[in-house]
Amino acid sequence: MIRAACLLLCTCMAWAGAPQSAAAVECRDLAHDGNRYTLCEVDAAQEQLQLFLKDDGGDVHGHFSRLDADLADQGKVLSFATNAGMYHTDRSPVGLFVEQGEEVTKLVPNAGPGNFGLLPNGIFCIRQGRADVYETLTFRDSDVRCDYATQSGPMLVIDGALHPRFLPDSTSFFIRNGVGTSADGTRAVFVISRNAVTFHQFGSLFRDHLQLPNALYFDGNISRLHAPQVGRSDAGFMMGPIVGVVEDKAE
């Protein structure tokens, strides 16, 4: 009788002490193959994941602090964010950008200079209940419609394989950030390196450690992260597209 009562009490205490729902975003530091990273994982089937470029007045958000302030006026809070693709000097996106179902800039299918034009590049697409990384031409030839989308490049992982141009002995080291998604679209994992890494090292993290079939590079040394869970909110010069998770502000 006493034993049964103790078991019941322990069970009730464990239930009371357990969180009623998972955190909107889970961020943590990790090490892989001698390099250091910060990772933020989002359940795309449950959380409000979206892209941001301009406020209601037509001004580029540009900074996490400005975006968070704008959301606060709406009773919302930014629980996670990172830069989400390359941009021109006026902060307009390079390649496809879709916001709230409206195409802001058009898809660029051809090769070109810089990392963006290192084909294959890709699309990060957010729609109801899921988020996916697609190779650009595969996306172009599909009937997928996104609520939010951003084009960037190069692809890091394509159907489980590293980008064919990545070299194991590369000497090009930079801070890098990107996103990988699961095959069912429910798992979106955003990663920023904490030390300079090569494309091969960065892509291998998504493929081998995170075991994600598709992953996309966002950018290099301009990469920044807003992750209050790990006490980090990077500041600096203005960014272009931002991806983030929005929550209702706690009363």
Image: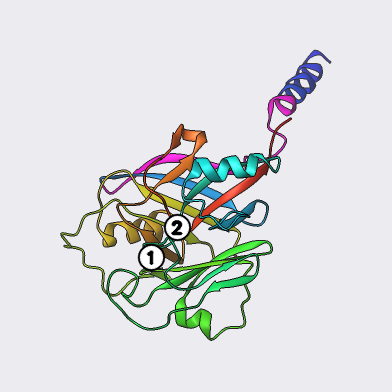
Q: Callout 2 environment at 10 Å: few (<14), some (14 to 19), or many (20+)? A: many
Name the kind of residue labelled 2 in the image: Gly
Disc 1 + disc 2, Cβ < 8 Å: yes
In the image, what residue occupies the spot 21% across and 67% down?
Answer: 167
**Residue 24 within the magenta-colored segment of the rendering:** yes
Residue 102 sits in which quadrant?
A: bottom right
Element class at badge 2: loop
**Residue 176 within the magenta-colored segment of the rendering:** no
Residue furthest to the front: 57
Residue 159 sits in which quadrant?
A: bottom left
Q: Image check: 196 left or right of 61?
A: left
In depth, the one of 218 and 214 nearer the eye is 218
What residue is disc 1 on? 88
In the image, what residue occupies the spot 46% across and 34% down?
Answer: 230
Q: Image check: 69 left or right of 135?
A: right
What residue is disc 2 on? 240
In depth, the one of 185 and 109 nearer the eye is 109
Residue 162 at x, y percent in the picture: 34, 69
Q: Which residues are magenta?
A: 14-33
